[in-house]
Amino acid sequence: MSLLITGGTGFIGSHTVVELLALDKDIIIVDNLANSSTLVLDRINKITEKSVTFIQADICDRQAMQQVFQQHDIDAVVHFAGLKAVGESSAIPLSYYHNNVSGSVTLFQVMAEYGVKNLVFSSSATVYGENNPSPLDESMPTSATNPYGQTKLMIENILFDLASSDEEWSIACLRYFNPIGAHESGLIGENPNGIPNNLLPYVAQVAVGRLAQLQVFGDDYDTVDGTGVRDYIHVVDLAKGHVKALEKLSKIKGCVPINLGTGNGTSVLEIVNTFKDISGQEIPYKVVPRRAGDIATVFADASVANSLLGWSAQYDLSTMIKDTWRWQSKNPNGFE
């Protein structure tokens, strides 16, 4: 039996594939390479000394997805594939709704057609919106403030409805907080296209000279130093959370939302100063106005992941930043 990993050459997908290969799982990656590169496959092979089956295809392409399920005996799916830039989603919302929502529906329909009803879905803490106080837990009401967040929320609602309609489905809906870090080898890490949308790759690219300075969005929040506080989690911890979810799927009935975070908050300037200390590089920054929809503090209650999956985050902030810096300094231009 094989595991299908959609978006498996991306940042979180590639790290999850490494963890699964360490357990001798048979992996099939489907990716359209919109946000990634096949060079990742060589790096995965170097780390694990194992190979995967790679299929370049789009989850929106029903015929291509049917062919994948026809040709492979798939036991479960880990669904990462999707566009993920918040700002871009507001500029090209139809692309996000088509790719993320329509593509996911196509994938779920083909899974049902071939009797594959075990799924781990890559969701996001963005589904908590901006009105819930931290720590955020899975019982809180959900909402979204941008098209990217709306697509995650729509897919979650589709999965809840799907599971209610057919009790054979076992779905772990993993709500990520802020993934950072990289594999300890420095061979794989976050490699965003263009200007990074997330804090750590932006800081790292400033540190290696690719970008001139960091923009800090607001320094007048009610936090330790006035800058926004977020829950940063090591991507390897996140990957191991997917492994645990796959192991426990047989005990999950229906669709269960699960937070993956550390339960700790770190401010933007705490990140900047820690990165500066670890890398020895200056991180020039400029404070600019707050972004619409940003809130002061966001961090997880991860107790459900601990009790249901037996998972908790293991890496501290220093290790997350050391691994980020090792990746970026060894690969200043990413995989290219």
Image: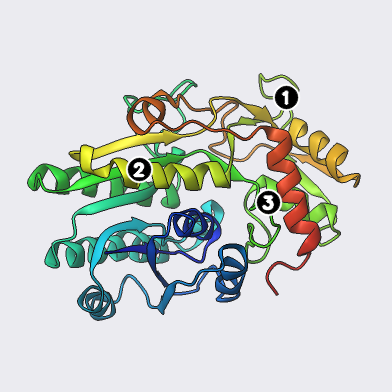
Residue at disc 3, secondary structure = loop
The answer to the question of whether label 2 and label 1 lie on touching residues, with beta carbons closer than 8 A, is no
- For residue 106, above or below residue 328: below
Residue 208 place in picture, x, y as percent: 84, 58
The answer to the question of whether label 3 and label 1 lie on touching residues, with beta carbons closer than 8 A, is no
Residue 38 place in picture, x, y as percent: 55, 76
Residue at disc 2, secondary structure = helix
Front position in the image: 197 or 59: 59
Circle number at residue 245? 2
Q: Return the residue at label 1.
A: 226
Circle number at residue 76? none
Please state which amino acid type lies under the numbered disc 2. Ala
Figure quadrant of the C terminus: bottom right
- For residue 204, above or below residue 139: below
Inter-mark Cα distance, 3 to 2: 23 Å
Badge 2, how many Cα within 10 Å: few under 14, some, many 20+? Answer: many
Rendering quarter of residue 160: top left
Front of the two marks 3 and 1: 3
Inter-mark Cα distance, 2 to 1: 36 Å
Q: Return the residue at label 3.
A: 184
In this image, 254 relative to 240: left or right?
A: left
* Sequence-wise first label, 3 or 1: 3
- Do we see residue 124 in this rendering? no
* Sequence-wise first label, 3 or 2: 3
Q: Residue drawn at (45%, 38%), measured in percent from left and top?
A: 125
- For residue 54, above or below residue 25: below
